[in-house]
Amino acid sequence: MNSSVSRRVNRVPVNRWNQIPLMLTKQNVDVLVTVSPENVTYTSGHFEYTLPIIRDRISATILPAEGEPVYLVVNQVEDAARRNSWIKDVRIYKENAESPVAALARILTEKGFASGCIAIESEFLTTGFFEELRGYLPNARFCDGSIILARARSVKTDEEVAFIEAAVKATETAHLKVFQELRVGDTEVEIARRLCAQTLLEGADLVSQNTVSSGRNTLEGHHVPDATAIQPGDVIQTDTGGIFAGYWSDISRQVVVGEPSSRQRSMWTKLRNAQREGVECMRVGTKAGDAYTHLKGLERWDNIWPYGHGIGVLIHDIPMLLPYYESGLKTTTNFGTNWELEPNMLVMVEFALFDREGGQRYTFEDLVLVTDNGPRILSNVIDTTEMYVVA
């Protein structure tokens, strides 16, 4: 095990400004405005954890094709924004005393964009906020900037790769430490609480999701841990993630209580072989949706669910290992399945096997880096060659 993964993950703001102006210029966009908590974190380098839970508390980054960016925040977080963001021009508005949308409109007008082309996050900005913004800027032309942001997020910098790798390994280390202490009779909710605490001890700011299921409960998707006690022969499925300075970690691991039966060994081997085949599909030039279609069409994996998702400031981000639907939702999630994989994309390759006759589901995932030399698995704290045996 890499001894460095148990340290607190380093926190270095990443300036992603360089690539965005060129993307805006190519699409004849004058300025890009981000308002979602995730994209504000991504473009400012400042993680403000209250934004997802206090929806009226809007922060925004104003990113022009030419000129310097501006960071708009509520007055309560001004000091943190100035300390943590790489954007030097930080503006504030007073919470409840004035509209953040009015403050945003003033900045756009000051910068000369009142009659320009403004890209907004139409997948996030509410109708009410958009109508208010359009009322302040009646001569502006608005377009959707969600695809621009998704394109930018999908290919990671080397610094981002190292950061997310350390976060995922820290989360996997939390799993390993909890697994080493499991005993027959422990309940799902007790295990979940230990995982939560250990993930924080390994460096996470927050625990984002925490699923623990055992026995037949594993057949439920995203089972809420309850008072079910683990018993000999049970398969235990965990899926936990943390938030590290605005970036998500995610890891799913499977353990068995006592020596696995021949059926359990067979199911695990089948799942792991399928998942490794999925990993091998993560190659430069392959479309994520095509990889999904190929894997789903293999008859030998009839009871296996192939899946995969990018990870970063969103837990499910581009690229998505899902089918592309031409007549489906006009969202980045659907469009992104039709994009080719590129070097420095990160994919959580997550497969599940449903053994309904045996009364258990088997699931695990790995963080995979797409490189010019083929895919590379980065989540290697726990050896998954065989199921991890506890108790």
Image: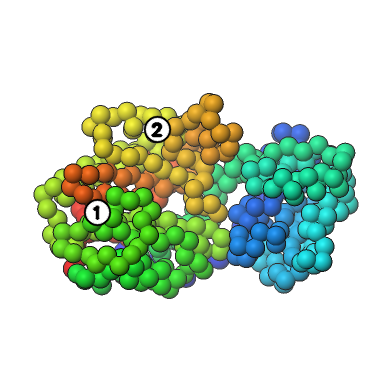
Q: Where does label 1 land, which residue?
A: 216
Asked whether the viewer can see residue 146, the reply is: yes
Cα gap from disc 1 to disc 2, whole angstroms: 30 Å
Q: Which residue is mark 2?
A: 291
Quarter holding the C terminus is: bottom left
Residue 67, position as x, y percentages in the image: 80, 49
Local crowd size for mark 1, using a 10 Å CA cut-off: few (<14), some (14–19), many (≥20): some
Give residue 232's quadrant in the image. bottom left
The image position of residue 305, as x and y in percent, is 33, 40
Type of amino acid under label 2: Ala
SS type, badge 1 = helix
Q: Residue at x 53, y 26 (%)?
A: 326
Give SS at disc 2. helix
- Provide residue 354's location: percent of width, then percent of height: 26, 44
Q: Nearer the viewer, residue 339 or 134?
A: 134
Q: Which mark is residue 200?
A: none
